[in-house]
Image: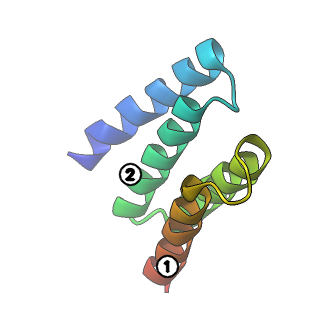
Amino acid sequence: RYADALELSEQVLKDSRRTLGSEHPDTLQSMRNLAVTYSALGRHVAALELQEEVLEISKRVFSPDHPIIAKYQEYMQYIRWKAT
């Protein structure tokens, strides 16, 4: 089922970037969802790279104390843990 989710997540992200832009909160969530799928498929390097991009953009878009920043940082640590 993750293989199906991968295809859908990639398409959603592509469409989101095109229609909303790379810094829209919904696009960032689509990126995170794709990172989750990558991680579930054992593609931890791809997941980590994408999650790092999510975090970098989020730090520009949201205030430093916004709760989403902590959420994205926490997930990045989880991916690193899964990769070991």
Q: Residue at x 30, y 44 (%)?
A: 3
Q: Is residue 4 above or below residue 50?
A: above
Q: In the rendering, at what x and y percent does residue 30 appear?
A: 49, 37
Q: In the rendering, at what x and y percent does residue 82 appear?
A: 43, 78
Instruction: Say which of 19 and 84 sits in front.
Output: 19
- Residue sitting farthest toward the left: 1
Query: Image quadrant of residue 61?
Result: top right
Q: In the rendering, at what x and y percent does residue 5 appear?
A: 31, 39
Q: Residue at x 41, y 35 (%)?
A: 9
Instruction: Say which of 68 and 14 sits in front.
Output: 68
Say what secondary structure mark 1 lies in: helix
- Residue sitting farthest toward the right: 60
| Kind of residue sitting beneath label 2 | Thr
Query: Image quadrant of residue 72?
Result: bottom right
State how many labels appear. 2
Q: Which residue is mark 1?
A: 83
Instruction: Say which of 2 and 64 sits in front.
Output: 64
Q: Is residue 18 above or below residue 9?
A: above
Q: Residue at x 70, y 45 (%)?
A: 62
Mark 1 or 2 closer to N-term?
2
**Dot 2, how many residues are within 10 Å of its Cα: few (below 14), some (14-19), or many (20+)?**
many
Q: Residue at x 52, y 31 (%)?
A: 26
| Kind of residue sitting beneath label 1 | Ala
Label number found at residue 37: 2
**Left or right of 40 in this view: 83:** right
- Residue sitting farthest toward the top: 19
**Dot 1, how many residues are within 10 Å of its Cα: few (below 14), some (14-19), or many (20+)?**
some
